[in-house]
Amino acid sequence: MRDVLLVAAADVSLGWRSALMGVTAGVAVRTTGKGRRAAVGDWYAFTLSFKGVVLEGLEVAFIVVTFGSNQGSIPLAVVGAAVVGAAAVLVVPAAWIAVRGPLAQVLENTLKFVVGVLLGTFWGAEGTGARWPGNDAALLVVIAVVSMTAVACLRTVHRRLVPEATVTVASKVA
Amino acid sequence: MDRLVRGLRGFGAFWWDVVVGGDWQVAIGVVVALAVTALLVDLKAPAWWFLPIAVLMLLGLSLARGAHDVGRS
C-alpha cells in the first residue's frame, strides 16, 4: 500500500482521484521498460506475471498445509492440491484466452491497493485467531476506513510532493 | 562465476522484494503487530482492533518517510 500511494502521489500529471484509480501503473512500465530479454518479448509483463504466480502459488501452499493440518492429513491435502494444480495448468490458460480483454483493463495500482486493504488487516487479524465484530460484515467497515485513510494520506503526500499541482487539482475537484 | 553471483543476487533480491518490499521497518512492524494480536487472542482479550490501528500507523509513518525521501531526490 505504501508503494502504491507513493507512486500515485508522485505522479505530477495526475490528480489524486485518477492516481488512486491506478492510472499510474504506467510509471512502473516507464521505469522498467518493456524491452526484450532472451526469449521473452516483454520483460516487464513477464516479471509481473511471474511474481504474481509465485506469490499465489505460495498462498495455495500455505492454504493446503493449513487445511491438511486441521483435518489431520497433510499428505491427502497435498495430493488434492496436486490434482487441482494439474487442472489449473489447463484451466488458467483457457480462462486467460476467454477473458484476456477485460483482464487487461484491471489496473495494477488498484489491484495492489485492494489486496493491501484485504490482506493487510482483515485476513491478517483472522489468521492470528482474532474474531471481528459482525464477522465478515466487518470487512466492509475495514475497507471503508482504510480506503478513507489512504485517500487522506494520498492527498497529504501529493500536496507535500507537488504543491502547485495539488492546488490545481483541488480547485478542479471543488 | 560472475553470472552465478549475479543470478544468486537477483534471486535474493526477488525474495527480499516479495517478503519485505519497499520498507523493511514496515515488514518488522507488521510481524510485531501480528504477534501482539496473537498474544491478545491467547490472553482471551479483544484483539481485532489492534492490527488495523497498527497497519494504519505503520502506513502513515512509512509514507511520511517515503515522501521525505522522494522529495529530497
Image (cartoon, grey):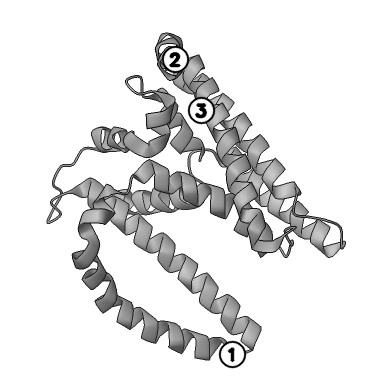
Q: Secondary structure at mark 1?
A: loop
Going from N to C along the chain, the mark reached first, 2 or 1, is 1
Residue bearing mark 3: A154
Q: How many marks?
A: 3
Q: Amino acid at mark 2?
A: Thr
Q: Nearer the viewer, mark 2 or mark 1?
A: 2
Please, which chain is the residue tagged with disc 1 on?
A
Q: Amino acid at mark 3?
A: Leu
Q: Earlier in the sequence, mark 3 or mark 2?
A: 3
The residue positioned 13% from the left and 46% from the top of the image is A36
**Residue B4 visible in image:** no
Question: Could you tell me how far apart the alpha carbons at marks 3 and 2 are, in whole angstroms?
Answer: 11 Å
Reply above or below: A166 against A101. Answer: above
Name the spot of residue A71 as percent of width and height, x first.
63, 87
The residue shown at (45%, 10%) is: A167
Q: Is the residue marked by circle 2 packed among few (<14), some (14-19), or many (20+) residues within 10 Å? A: many
Q: Amino acid at mark 1?
A: Ser
Judge left or right: residue A144 versus residue B52.
left
- Report which residue position mark 2 lands on: A166
In this view, the residue farthest toward the front is A174
Residue highlighted by disc 1: A73
**Are callouts 3 and 2 both on one chain?**
yes
Which chain letter matches label 2? A
In this view of the protein, which residue sits in the foreground, A142 or B18? A142
Residue A80, given in percent of the width and then of the height, sits at: 45, 87
Residue B23 visible in the current orientation = yes
Q: Earlier in the sequence, mark 3 or mark 1?
A: 1
Quadrant in the rendering for residue A31: top left
Q: Residues within 10 Å of mark 1 (few under 14, many from 20)?
A: few
